[in-house]
Image (cartoon, rainbow, N blue to C red):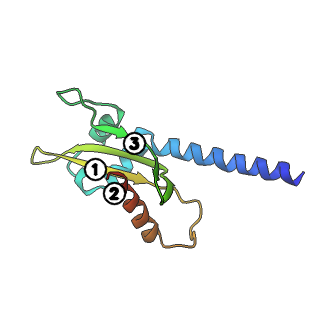
């Protein structure tokens, strides 16, 4: 019976994790995260950010937004799985475009036993290393 409870509990946690990731990727939620935390989004309206996320394309037919592969496997360094990894091209006030790479991570405990800044540096290093 203990094994059944353990499997049920693990499956429940996995299901909640997947649902949280889907919520993060919803244009209304992700748009608010981008608007609230990304400096380059300060001159872009929330409505415009949401439209970019939903699939608006530029004059050449390129999407402004792209959800990226959230799993990076680097030989001899292991695998990392981001909760929600994407990039968005944001129009700027000077009529240029800024590409922003965004990794949104969910934490289910207030104090995970490590500094969030350390974990952030690790994830950022993985993103940069994967481009080589």
Horizontal and vertical percent position of residue 78:
51, 57
Badge count: 3
Looking at the image, is mark 2 or mark 1 earlier in the sequence? 1
Under tag 2, what secondary structure? helix
Horizontal and vertical percent position of residue 127:
37, 55
Q: Nearer the viewer, residue 80 or 28?
A: 80
Name of the residue lying farthest toward the front = 76
**Hey, which quadrant is residue 36 in on the image?**
bottom left
Residue 100 bears which disc, if any?
1
Count residues near mark 1 (Cα–Cα under 10 Å), then give few for <14, some for 14-19, many for 20+: some
The CA distance from mark 2 to mark 1 is 13 Å
- Residue drawn at x 63%, y 47% is 16
Under tag 3, what secondary structure? loop
Q: Nearer the viewer, residue 125 or 94?
A: 125
- Residue drawn at x 17%, y 27% is 59
- Residue drawn at x 29%, y 36% is 52
The CA distance from mark 1 to mark 3 is 12 Å
Q: In the image, which is nearer the foreground, mark 2 or mark 3?
A: 2
Name of the residue lying farthest toward the right = 1
- The residue under label 3 is 68
Horizontal and vertical percent position of residue 4:
84, 48
Looking at the image, is mark 1 or mark 3 earlier in the sequence? 3
Looking at the image, is mark 2 or mark 3 earlier in the sequence? 3
Under tag 1, what secondary structure? strand
- The residue under label 2 is 128
The CA distance from mark 2 to mark 3 is 14 Å
Residue 116 bears which disc, if any?
none
The answer to whether residue 45 is visible is no
């Amino acid at each position: 019976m203990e094994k059944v409870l353990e499997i049920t509990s693990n499956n429940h946690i996995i299901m909640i994790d997947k649902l949280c990731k889907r919520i993060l990727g919803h244009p209304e939620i992700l748009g608010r995260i981008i608007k609230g935390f990304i400096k380059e989004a300060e001159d872009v309206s929330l409505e415009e950010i949401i439209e970019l996320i939903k699939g608006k394309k530029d004059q050449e037919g390129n999407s402004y937004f792209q959800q990226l592969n959230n799993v990076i496997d680097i030989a001899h360094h292991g695998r990392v799985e981001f909760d929600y990894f994407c990039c968005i091209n944001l129009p700027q006030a000077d009529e240029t475009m800024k590409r922003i790479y965004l990794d949104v991570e969910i934490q289910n405990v207030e104090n995970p036993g490590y500094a969030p800044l350390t974990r952030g540096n690790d994830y950022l290093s993985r993103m940069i290393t994967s481009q080589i």
